[in-house]
Image (cartoon, rainbow, N blue to C red):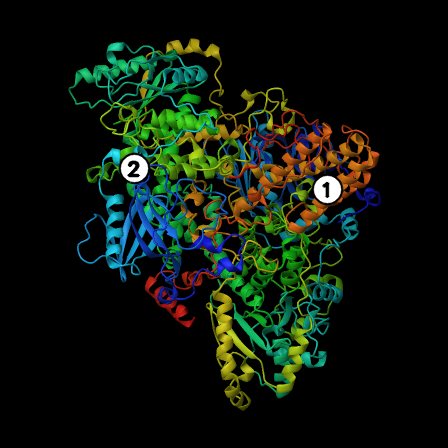
Amino acid sequence: MLSLGTGGGKASKASFVSYVTPEEIKSEKEPPKKNKHPELLPGEVVFCSANPILKFTQDDQSQRGVFGTLLCTNFRVAFVSDEEEDAAQHFKNRLYGEHDIPLMCVDSIYGGYDDKKKLITSGLVKNKSPNKMIIHCKDLRVFQFCLTFTKEEDARKIFQGIVHHCLEPKSLKCVFAFSYSNIPNPERWATTTFDSAEDWNQEMKRTRGWCKIVTGNENFELSQRLPQVFIVPKAVSEEDYAKFQGLGLPIWCWSHHTGCALFKASSVPMLQEDTVAQAYMERMLNDVAQNHLYSVKTEDLSETLPSIQEIQLAYTKFKQFFLIDNTTDFWMSDVKWFSSLENSGWLDIIRQYLQKAVEVVECLEAENTNVLIMEEDGTDLCCVISSLVQLMLDPYFRTLPGFQSLVQKEWVAGGHNFQDRCNHLHHKDKEQCQSPVFLLFLECVWQLLQQHGPGFQFSETYLTVLSDSVHVPVFSTFLFSSACQRVSSIRADSPQTQRGALSCPAVWDWSVQFDRKAQDFFINPLYAEKPVKVVKKSHRPKHQRQLSLPASAFKTPSKKSFFKEETDSLKKMLRLRRISRWMLSPDSPQPSTREFYEAWLRKPLDYHGLLLPCLSGPAIRLWVQRYLRWLPEVQVFGGGAMAVISRLSELLAQVQELKQQLEWKGHRQETNHRGVPAHLQPAVRHSSVFPFASSRNWSFRPVIPTNVFQSLLVPDSLADQDDEYTEVVSLV
Amino acid sequence: MQISCSTLVHFIFFIHMQERMLSHSGPHARGRDMFGLCCLPGECVLQRATLVRKKLSAKEGGGWLAGTLFCTDFRVAFVPQDSPKPNDNADPVLLGDHDVALASIEKVVAVGPTRTKLVTPSSSLKFTPEELVLYCRDLRVLCFLFDRLTPEKQAVEITHEIAKIYQPLKPGSVLSFQNAALGSIEMKQFLSNRKRDLSMNWFESSADWEQELERTGATGWRVSSVNDRFEMATSLSRFNVVPQKVLDTELKKTFAHFHEGRIPRWCWRHPRGSNLLRMASFQNNIYHEKDDIRNLELVLFGGQQLCVVVDLAEEMPSPPDIQLAYSRLRALCLGDISASVSVPDDKWLSSLEGTRWLDYTRCCLRKSAEVACLLRGGHLTIVLQEPEDRDMSCVVSSLVQVMCDAHCRTVPGLQGLIQKEWVMAGHRFLSRVNYHRDGEKEEAPVFQLFLDCVWQLFAQYPSRFQLSGDYLLALHDSLHLPIFSTFLANCQRERSRPLQHLSQSYTQVNGLRELPRVSPQDPTDPPLPPVWDWALQYSSERQAHFTQPATQPSTVPPLLNGNLNTCLDGHRQVDGLPGLVFLLSKGSFSSPCNLLPWRNGSGSGSYRKSHRRAPSAEMLLSLERLLKVCSPSEPSQEPQEPLLPILLGPCVKLWKDCYLRGVLHAQAFTHPMSSCLHPVDQLSWEVQQLQQMLVRSSTSGQPDSVSKKQEPQWAESNINQNANNGTFLFPISRSTHTQALTKAPTVHTTTTTTTTGQNAASAQPRPISREGSKHTFLFGHQPESSSNQRYVPTPNARLHKNSSSSQMF
């Protein structure tokens, strides 16, 4: 096991990683203890197990590995090493260990037959069972298990069992969350869940919105599409709520401080002659326009943005670069790294979504119009755009509790179809609907976070963990396809559940997964907290103030002042009922947002105001932590940005400690010297992907990848490169 | 770099503008007040435009800055409106924070209401420019916005003036530029009185080289002055380090065997006893006498049994390759305002790949990593061989030392390294940078490539460097300013010629072509300062950013068996065998029989072959192992373990701070963290403050002896701990700390300001709230302060609420 040789690099531990071939090991080995089990969670049941299984270290072709037991439970595929585990891990998940894979997290399984590998699609393995099993996970880990050392029957059983439980369609009630029983902990991060009218009321008060709360859908009488509680413009009449089962109804998302607001709606299927629907939509638009009498812009997102199928396609291509069976593959792909990244199109999709969000922000911020975004279902692209817009505009959502409530509001309460988009249940007919929309949103957030670090209270690690948690079948948050399904599943009397009320925690209860110390990694140490009002702004350098010259004196036309004053609303009266559609010509929106962006750039950066992403080529980057964390080849030991961050945290801890001591001095108390927390001991060098895979010891990494110079010599002919490569290897 | 101000006062002139205004700039003569431009002695202001705004980059805080724009015969200067009054007693600084030298400008573009135009000396401007964009050679882009209140005439005239006077591709313009900057008598006197920075090694005297030998613990070597008058090798430095065993008379005979006489010379010794040498290619058509062979082997093996020749000719990019890649990269990063075609965002990455610049940095780093790994093996000699030994071997040998030697990751260390491996070793700066803009063929940004490689290392191991990204950037920019003696010559001989008045005959004999106009008229030549005199270019605030606190103290490398060499040497003499020699090429080893031309063919070689066979194969394997098997990357890395860069695709990055700072939209993604005080700085400052306060409060609050004893003890132990773990505060802070400790008894209350002289200006101990220790950092706002101190406590720096113990990303 990889982690075995870790923890201070003691010689005794490191010696475990075997240099001999597996056959040799086996002959020397005494029969291991049978049925070594991991600590099972409450409600977890073991389906099948096999021993001994060799788990390969993710390395080049060499057959090194660790022996242990492979189990399949109703929660995970677990591997328990025969050796003692090293407990010193700073970022340990309480639910599943380093070598465990939650069933939902399995992306694909390959069977290895001698030299070939074959994608397994169903539980029925026709001819002989493979001698190797390769599991690709949705959190981008790759496991390789060798099945040849166990009894053939056991091997077949465990293979079939794992394939069956991971890939076969199943019903919702088989999901582990329904068996898991856990006493919910008091929450550390207070998160508004938006399942009661009170929460919505609070939110509207906070944003000073001017709409009305509809509570009539408590039992989904109005429509199963709509959430239990939702907010519509004041002008919408009650009989319109359920006219098209909630289709086309503008749902309030957020209000700008000027009063204009963002609404989202699913589009009404409109035939050419369907006057009823047309009239309905007209009426809805008019109703939206009644909100503070601002004009309305509507945007059909599915017309201008990549569809969910395109997202899925791009992501499938993209993730292949990181799901690597052995390092040789990686070195080969490395030559054309940038262009292959680009060809996947994933980064460009991120850019397009951010671009669209900036356009919406411009309408709200600069043009002061209400915005209605529409899409077929109103729960996919709309969720991405509306939450991004709110993230850019509202500093509250950039705090950790704020961000969690944003996800609750837009995605969970908003009814994003997590079940089908992630295809949690592996239904074959739902594969068309599969698409990493939520991940796309997190990617966009990461880009923002990267560009405006101090503006966010949460860290990159938090986003990575959140993206992993989607595939942990313990939490209720990301399990359901709609609000309706959620409510009916959670209710005790529903036929969906057999064992009474569903009592699984929300993902926001992070203590389920991580202890308190590990949760500290979620916080961005550089977060610029909102300064208290008392503090005067005198610390700003002079040049950041506005110039002493009157703004109007400059030749560059500043179109409007950014923040509208309240007196402007008189002018708005004239614009009443003007409803404009977004210009659909492809070239026109670009320059206008660019102007908007430049105007924003000209102002001093305020981390508690509007934050816009830069979308130029070099600015959109690869989320290194998420995608490369399991690849030992790209880890920089004792280096990377982590080195600076950990040093920063060290210093912060020291400041804290000193302050405390000073305080004690002040109270004339005894000092008791408290050490720096263990995981911050400066002696420990972290790798660049810390806290993930922090404890691994990759002693077999060759110093220098062999292909770099080849790429220089023979850039075009890959065949030659292969030859040269083998030549070099054979020399060794 | 420290000069007592008083002696210099009489050199310093603050020149009133109107006195220096040229006659044709009549319209401005009405403006009788000073505009705050601190001219150099002899510098003439040619044009002035008022009410101009300069676009600030994210590093400078973003936004626009109002002020006055000047065009002098040396620079384009911008003086912010409310800048402090210049200090009359200050040393002249060549360039202010917002200035750009004329010679750095590459293109002048005027932006009108409807169109943009590239302004050339001959072109006429048909519209009033609203914006003036200066594209610089160092990839900066300066953007000035003319205000509506700017007199139109001023806007037009200054644009014209800059276009007319900035260095167009005209031979000889470099000299006139230098004269404008440094030509005045006051300036010459000032420069000749400048003291050298003694903290770095200049490698100019033999004592300097001996110091380096001592520092690295190399024995068996001596400094030879056989090339003192550049008779043996014109492109080599005066002093060269050769094996002790070789006498000067013997040494003289070896020069002819190498291209341009560049014999194998010692560069550096690894703590494990290996030596790094570099040499040019062999002259093949020469007869080898037996005595010669002995000396050649001695010089090459340097007292070791095993020698690896690293071939830098084959797989490394050639200078034209580098030039092509660099020009592509420039075009990609800078865009071209006159050519409206730019790379679409979604094609950016593949275009970046297409420039191949990153491939070349990888290639250099990889080669250097190989050499660094080999050096770990100990007791062998590694010779870098390049046909000319003046480009890639500079890059590789210095990168190896940056990787292996912590000293080279400090500012003085890197400066010494560049002196040693580039300046003295004869890198052709003058031709490669092409200051004269004549021989385009020779131009190649080899030094920029090296800086990029160092930056890659820095980006991967930021905590192992004492120097900062800002320093690398400053060095990069200085390369484009043709006033430094460091860069204005191709070798030491050229550099010292104006002073030495060497006779021409030597050049004739050695067949060197006539050198370009370096020193046409000696008497009028301004004395060129070295680039390391940073005070000439950068204010002390900006110099303070050259180092970063998060660093390891450069430990003196342990002398590992210093006398092992001699032991081996004796052994060698006894059995009389020639050493083994291998060639490292394309990542693998071989021992071709014609590697050393004198061993080839002649009868003497064949009889030894049988002798050599057995150890050779064994050696080959052990060498291969050195390259292939990395030492386990333990958490506790030894200091002499080289910093090996990871070179896979995702790990090699673009030096955005350098190449992309000109992009007008690039501001958002430059991390605002770097815009002012680095948070690590800020925090370590705060730790210092708190420790001081703690000491003070304990001594004042509890005068009884018990606690008094206890407290310094604690602080002392903390210091020790910091010194041990090697990553804590850098020397300055330690010294202030101890200072505080010694002073502690004299301070009485917690609220008095610190009396330590160094921090007197900035140390304003803010009252610490006893109840809540809330804490927040505010970045992007540099605390306003007139002092030059680096550590300025932000008045409202607070820890945020949730930082109960410590946080991480």
Q: How many marks?
A: 2
Question: Is B398 left, or right, of B613 in this rendering?
Answer: right
Q: Position of residue B722 (x, y in %)?
A: 67, 47
What secondary structure is marked by label 2?
loop
Q: CA distance from mark 2 to mark 1?
A: 56 Å
- The location of residue B280, given as percent across then percent down, is 58, 72
* B686 w.r.t. B231: above or below: above
Screen quadrant of the N terminus of chain A = bottom left
Measured as percent of width and height from the top left, residue A400 is found at: 47, 29
Chain designation of label 2: A
Q: Secondary structure at mark 1?
A: helix
Q: Which residue is at the front of the view, B138 or A173?
A: A173
- The crowd level at tag 2 (other Cα within 10 Å; few <14, some 14-19, many 20+) is many
Q: Residue at x 36, y 67 (%)?
A: A27
The amino acid marked with disc number 2 is Cys
Left or right of residue B711: residue A439: left
Q: Look at label 1 and name its amino acid.
A: Trp
Q: x, y (%) of residue A58?
A: 39, 56
Which residue corresponds to mark 2? A422
Residue B166 in view of the camera = yes
Q: Are marks 2 and 1 on the same chain?
A: no
Pointer 1 residue: B714
Regarding residue B13, the answer to whether it shows in the image is: no
